[in-house]
Structure formats: C-alpha cells, structure tokens
Amino acid sequence: MRRLLAVGLITVLLIASFPTFGTAQSNAPTPQKITTSQEFDDVEFHILVHSDSTAIWTFRYEKTLETQQERKQFEEFAQNFNTSDTELYKNFRENAVELTSTANNRTKRKMTAGNFSKRAFINQAGLTGDTTRGVVEMSFRWSGFAYGSGNTTVFGDVFQGGLYLGDNQKLVVYPADGMSFKSAQPPKGRSIAGDTLAESDSVSWSGPREFNDQRPMVKFSSPPQSSSSTSTTSTTGGANVPPGSGDERSDSNSPMMFFIAALVVLIGLAAVFAWRQGSLGSLSSGRSTPSGGGGGGGAGGSAATESTTNSAEPAVSDEELLTDEARVKKLLRENGGRMKQVNIVDETGWSKSKVSMLLSEMEEDGEISKLRVGRENIISLDGHEPDAAGSPLDR
C-alpha cells in the first residue's frame, strides 16, 4: 500500500453525516456524503510529539459561517456531535486504529491508538482570522509513533511511501516535554515559528504537496538533565510536570527516596570492593602497596594507583560516545569505505527502519552515497563508490 498515512489523512472525514451548510433544508434533512474539500475551507493535522515516543494527533477542520442560517445549522450539528456517538466520530476512531495497526506491521514497532477526544464549536477567530468559523476537532494518542535513543527522538518511518497533503491542508508538528527541533526534513517548503529551527515552537508544511518515502522526518533534542536540575524539579512540588506523569511530589519518606539511598550505598560498597581487588592484584604482581597508614609507602602507593587506573576499563566506551552518523562512517572506514546496508544493520544491531532513515539523511547531507544493486543497497564513503561495471561488493 503506497502512501500509508496519506490515505488515512484524506479518508478520515471522507464519508460523514454533515448537513450542507447554507442551503435550504426541510425539518428532517437527509445526511449527505461529502469530502473535506467540499464542506471545509481549511484542514490542519497537528502532531504533538512527546519524549516517550508517543504523539497526540489532532485533526482540525474549519468552515466559514457567512450567514445566520449557516451559524444556526452548525450549532445544531455541534450539539449533536458533542453529545452523541456520531457516525463521523466512529469512522475517525476506526481509521485511527487501522492506521496505527498498518504502521505497526510495517515498522515492526508496537503502536496503538487510544485516548480519543472530540469537540465542535464556533470560533470567532479561526485559522485564518475570519470573524466566525465552525470548528471540528478530533484527537487520539498514538503510542510508539516515534522512536529514539539518548536525548534524541525521531519520527518519519511511519510515512512509508511518503505523505500527501491536499489543497487547503496543513501539517503542523510541535515538540513537548521541553524538547527542541534538531532537524526537519525536507527543508523545502517548510515553515518555522521562530528565528531558528532550534528556537521554533512548531514546524509546518502546506499542501498541495507530495513527500518522498519516510518524509517528513523530524528529529528532536531533549534538554540535558543535570543533577542540580533534577533536584530542583523534585523539590518544586511537581512544577512543569508533563501531563500523564502523575504529578509525583518530592517526599523524604517516599519509597523511591529509600530506593535511591540504598542504590547509592550499594554503588559505594561495589567501589570499595573493586578497589580492594585492585590492591590485591598489585601485591601479587610484586608491587609495594602498604595496607596501613604509614608514611613510608608514598612512591609504592602511587605506582599501585597508577597501575590500577591504567588497567581499569573506562566507564563509557569510545563507541558509546559516537553519534549514530559517526558510528556508521567509522564502520565504513573499517570495511574499506563501503558496505552493504544489511551488514550495517547486523553490525550496529539497530532496526532496519532506523538504519534506512539514518542513511537517507546522511545521503541528503552528502556524507555517504547509496547505490542500488539488485535487491541490496551499497553504502559508500566519498571516493569509495564501486565502479558501475565492476563487481558491486563482497562485504
């Protein structure tokens, strides 16, 4: 199925029970089947992305109400929509569940749709500043929509086959939980609500337009968390706690505080044990390491300390300090400058979708090149591309 999400976005309100606003109706109007472009002037799809990889999707539809008759008709519709389970809302829920299920099967990442909500109302401003607009909003929570590691959260692999926005349609992305934009692809046609992308409150694209495979792709950076900021957050009584976190407040008698204290003690005991093990090892190797507090063992103690320090493994490996992009380039250099994409997946242990999106972005930035050979992609550093007439790659 091409355009995984495009179909979902367009058909969510494809068949619905709306009155035809502004036309004469009998006392028992017959519902008609309409498309969003026929009855609504503007359509926006809002995505609020959280650091736990969930996202709140909100579908917002607006219609200009030019006469009192149109206003009255919309008020009647809104009353019915808000107080009963209409066919429109049922279709929306069914489409959302099907949408996440399809994305789940394609990405092999667990996804669900839930926390549905709806409302219809008359807005005096609207998306374009009109005096009177009828607004319909429907939302749901998409768990597993994004993915990430460390301080980075990414989405885009759900748009397999690309995404299509029609006339008067707009896609708007917002970061939550204090995150900021790191990148937003494609940059062409992109609008930001700030001086720079990192400072922007939102990123949007307007239709009509068709995106390429796994686009749009947006990366977010989470704010760094220091021990001081964590302490401040704990003692402020739940200030700035994101929705759904339970508003947990700091309490010196809480089980969590006892758990943390016990963990600190265990880490201290482990450190003492490791130090003693290192001292015993130094003695067996013939080095002088006094166990008492005498002042004559300064040089020997220094040598033993140096030996223990040099032999100890670093707490964080060099590999863990590399970015994903740097790790891929290091892997390519270690394998002669080019590899099969499937081998990169095997070497890194990452998912196929993550590797695919990462390599696509690196190719756009000019860091690597991709060559399709049969069913496989050959990934190369600059200057290491295989000859067109030669054997592709045996790695």
Image (spheres, grey):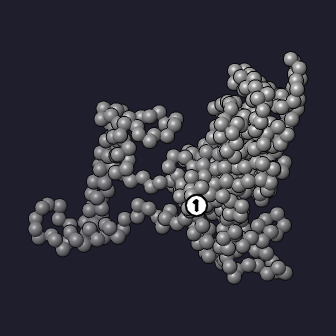
**Image point (32%, 46%), residue name:** 264
- What residue appears at the point 63 percent right and 40 percent down from the top-left corner? 56
* Residue 98 visible to an observer of this rendering: no
327 vs 91, nearest the viewer: 91
Where residue 88 appears, x then y in whole percent? 78, 29
User: In which quadrant of the rendered view does residue 193 lie?
Assistant: bottom right
Q: Amino acid at mark 1?
A: Leu
Q: Residue furthest left?
A: 295
x, y percentage for residue 148?
Answer: 58, 52
Residue 360 coordinates in the image, percent (x, y): 70, 64
Report the front residue among 14 and 241: 14
Residue 305 x, y percent position in the rendering: 26, 68
Q: Is residue 264 above or below residue 287?
A: above
Residue at 76% from the left image edge and 25% from the top image edge = 72
Q: Nearer the viewer, residue 345 or 143?
A: 143
* Mark 1, other Cα within 10 Å: few <14 / some 14–19 / many ≥20: some
Which part of the image, by quadrant, shows the C terminus?
bottom right
Whether residue 316 is visible here, answered yes or no, is yes
Give the vertical position of 60 relative to 214 (above or below): above
- Left or right: residue 36 compared with residue 353: right
- Based on the displayed image, in which of its 4 quarters is residue 367 positioned? bottom right
Q: Is residue 286 above or below residue 224?
A: below
Q: Secondary structure at mark 1?
A: loop
Residue topped by disc 1:
197
Q: Residue at x 47, y 33 (%)?
A: 246
Residue that extends furthest to the top in the rendered view of this protein: 27
Q: Residue furthest front?
A: 68
